[in-house]
Structures are given as C-alpha cells and as structure tokens.
C-alpha cells in the first residue's frame, strides 16, 4: 500500500485517544475499588506512580492494564505486526511530551520503569496478536467448474 500520512496520523490520534480513555477508566475503577482521588495528575504526573508502595501499584496497574488494552487496539486499528513497535513507542513518546508540558519532566525512576515496561508489553502483545491475525488462512470461495 502507498504511503498515506492521513491514515497514519488518524491511527496515532485514535490510539492516543483510546489510551487516555482506558487509562481514565482504570483510574476511575481504582477510585471505586481502592479509594484514591480522581485527578488528571494521576495521568500526567509522576506523583502517584511508585513501584515501592501498595498505593503506587494501584496506579501502576492502571498504566499496565491500559497497555494491555493498547495491544488489542493495535490489533484493531493498526493491524500490521511490523508497525506495532512504531505506534507503541510513538504513543508513549507523545504521552511523555504531554507529561512534560503538564508538569515538567517526570522526576521519579518509577515513572520511567513502569512506562518502559508498559511500552514493552504493548509492543510484544500487539505484535503477537497482529501476527496471529495475519497468519489466519484467507477463506477462498469453493471452486466450481
């Protein structure tokens, strides 16, 4: 297929939008299950991401679960296993830029660890799901003579 910048841009916008919707949904679920506050800071700052505390893992879990959903979104939106790395890294790079704009450069190692792990999970699972779909047999119409 020819290079289509509009398609690529719309796929990036769709992935980014669904990423924030799912992350917000999991943060909302965390509020009902565990009681932490609902604030946009949970998405765009490093204040709540912490690998050393139980409450930190509540938000860590939201990020990691959203990367699992992101892998499924790669299957639905991107559909090509060799594009999963590019789209996943782009998603998390845009997220990093948004975090920097919102609150400055994230200041904890935990933030970087969780987001790198989430990127790796999204890439590997997305590539796996897309490759399974690509390997499905193409149905052929029965040959009649």
Image: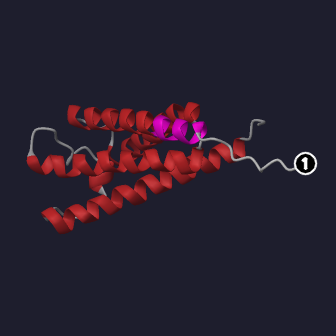
Question: Horizontal and vertical percent for residue 80?
Answer: 60, 38
Q: Residue at x 63, y 41 (%)?
A: 137
Q: Residue at x 37, y 45 (%)?
A: 67
For this orientation, the residue located farthest to the left is 53
Q: Up-down: is 142 above or below 93?
A: below
Question: Horizontal and vertical percent for residue 91?
Answer: 47, 42
Badge 1 crowding class, 10 Å Cα cut-off, few under 14, some 14 to 19, many 20 or more, is few
Q: Nearer the viewer, residue 139 or 88?
A: 139
Q: Residue at x 26, y 32 (%)?
A: 113
**Magenta portion: prevailing SS class:** helix
Which image quarter holds the N terminus? top right
In the picture, residue 114 is in which quadrant? Answer: top left
Q: Up-down: is 89 above or below 78?
A: above
Q: Tell me if 10 is positioned left or right of 53 in this view.
A: right
Question: Horizontal and vertical percent for residue 54?
Answer: 9, 48
Q: Residue at x 27, y 52 (%)?
A: 62
Q: Name the residue beneath numbered marker 1.
A: 145
In the picture, residue 20 is in which quadrant? Answer: bottom left
Indicate whether residue 38 is drawn in magenta.
no
Which residues are the magenta region?
126-135
Question: Horizontal and vertical percent for residue 55?
Answer: 12, 51
Q: Nearer the viewer, residue 63 or 127?
A: 127
Which SS class for mark 1? loop
Q: Nearer the viewer, residue 115 or 61?
A: 61
Q: Tell me if 63 is positioned left or right of 4 in this view.
A: left
């Amino acid at each position: 297929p020819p290079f289509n910048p509009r398609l690529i841009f719309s796929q990036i916008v769709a992935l980014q939008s669904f990423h924030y919707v799912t992350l917000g949904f999991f943060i909302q679920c965390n509020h009902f299950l565990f009681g932490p506050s609902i604030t946009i800071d949970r998405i765009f700052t490093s204040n709540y991401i912490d690998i050393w505390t139980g409450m930190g893992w509540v938000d860590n879990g939201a990020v990691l679960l959203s990367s699992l959903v992101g892998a499924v979104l790669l299957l639905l939106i991107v559909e090509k296993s060799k594009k999963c790395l590019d789209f996943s890294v782009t998603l998390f790079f845009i997220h990093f830029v948004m975090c920097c704009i919102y609150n400055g450069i994230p200041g904890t190692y935990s933030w970087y660890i969780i987001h790198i792990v989430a990127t790796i999970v999204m890439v590997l699972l997305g590539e796996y799901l897309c490759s399974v779909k690509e390997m499905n047999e193409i149905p052929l119409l029965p040959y009649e003579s």
